[in-house]
Image: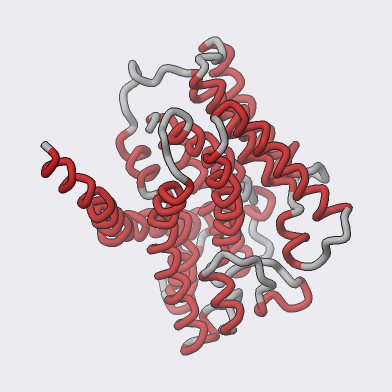
Amino acid sequence: MLVQLQYARAIAALLVVYFHSVLQLERMDPDTVFASFRFGETGVDLFFVLSGFVMWLTTADRNMSPVGFYRRRIERIVPLYWSLTLLASAIALTFPSYLNSTKFDLQHLLASLFFVPWINPASGAEELITPVVIPGWTLNFEMYFYLIFGSLLLLPKITRIPALFVVFVAIFLLSNWGSAKGVMASFYGNAIVFEFLAGVLIAKLYLDKRLLQSGLALVLVLVAFVGLVAADAAHLEVPRLISAGLPAAIIIYGLVSLDFTKVAEFKFLHLIGDASYSLYLTHVFTLVAVRIFYRYQPIEWLNVGPVFLTVCVVSSVLVALMSFWLFEKPVADYLAKKRAGPRTARATVSN
């Protein structure tokens, strides 16, 4: 994996953590000045572009079957997500006052476990389409993308991207202007799915060595990042695909155009990139714990906004690293060895 993509993953996850931390601060202090600096939600747009990039990069020149592709993605996504979904459901069932955004509901739980878009029963009149673990709404999109992308591996490589475009556009149009209605149409009719396609196209350009000149790439990355954050903070009434998807795509294209092999590695940022999936999923639990801690802690200076936000972000990173080292990585290593074992044994016998 390109090291700059690990950095991008880390920054994307930290943006989301910061965004949710500010929301927690606003609940404690509605008049906080940080309400005017609430941004970071668009970190998920970086994740979507990255996802499309990685999917094409890891399959374009490999003979991979849809089954093999699905197995790898399930092994990557499901263990941690299911564990946290079941944990959140157990907390909602036994201590419902701790999770304001989660209400135990068996149908909602099952839909969440199988990545089916479902209205969150805790959202009330807003009728938000989110799973038990709120950030998992992006995983519903991921699995949708994987389902389509994996099936297209049966096609010749040269036709996969056009086919992906046609399928995405057809489903988008049917969901928005056809007879389809309801939760599914509302969810899959979101233009955010085209950010995956942008990532795929960038990966194609990367493999074809059609990259930006280094100086231009660096400028575009910086300008696009500032634009991404500024548009997010300003809450512009602009389609998300334009205000967030476009700068996210420019950032990723610019980053992969740069040569990081001669740059000293940012090891901690790389580590956060490795643990970005754990950080993305566990931080909502960590922030609840911080909120509960602040409900009882007696130290006055800890109540200052910047200190609270620092505690939120640092605690989220520490919990994520523990999750990565103690759960995510060991499980991934075990599943990878289990998948490779039979092939290794057959190769040994044949030799």
How many numbered discs? 0
Q: Quadrant of residue 219?
A: top right
Q: Looking at the picture, tell me which residue is in the foreground, 320 or 128.
A: 128
Quadrant where the image shows the N terminus: top left
Q: Residue at x 58, y 29 (%)?
A: 251
Above or below residue 305? Residue 131 is: below
Above or below residue 27? Residue 245 is: above
Q: Residue at x 29, y 61 (%)?
A: 327
Q: Looking at the picture, tell me which residue is in the foreground, 27 or 197.
A: 197
Percent of width and height locating residue 7: 43, 35
Percent of width and height locating residue 242: 75, 36
Residue closest to the far bottom = 94
Q: Quadrant of residue 222?
A: top right
Percent of width and height locating residue 182: 79, 67
Q: Residue at x 44, y 76 (%)?
A: 86
Residue closest to the far front = 350
Q: Looking at the picture, tell me which residue is in the foreground, 347 or 224.
A: 347
Q: Residue at x 56, y 14 (%)?
A: 212
Quadrant where the image shows the C terminus: top left
Q: Tell me how the rendering is colored.
A: secondary structure
Residue 128 left/right relative to 268:
right
Percent of width and height locating residue 103: 59, 82
Let me know if residue 80 appears in the view. yes
Q: Looking at the picture, tell me which residue is in the foreground, 104 or 291.
A: 104
Let me know if residue 229 appears in the view. no
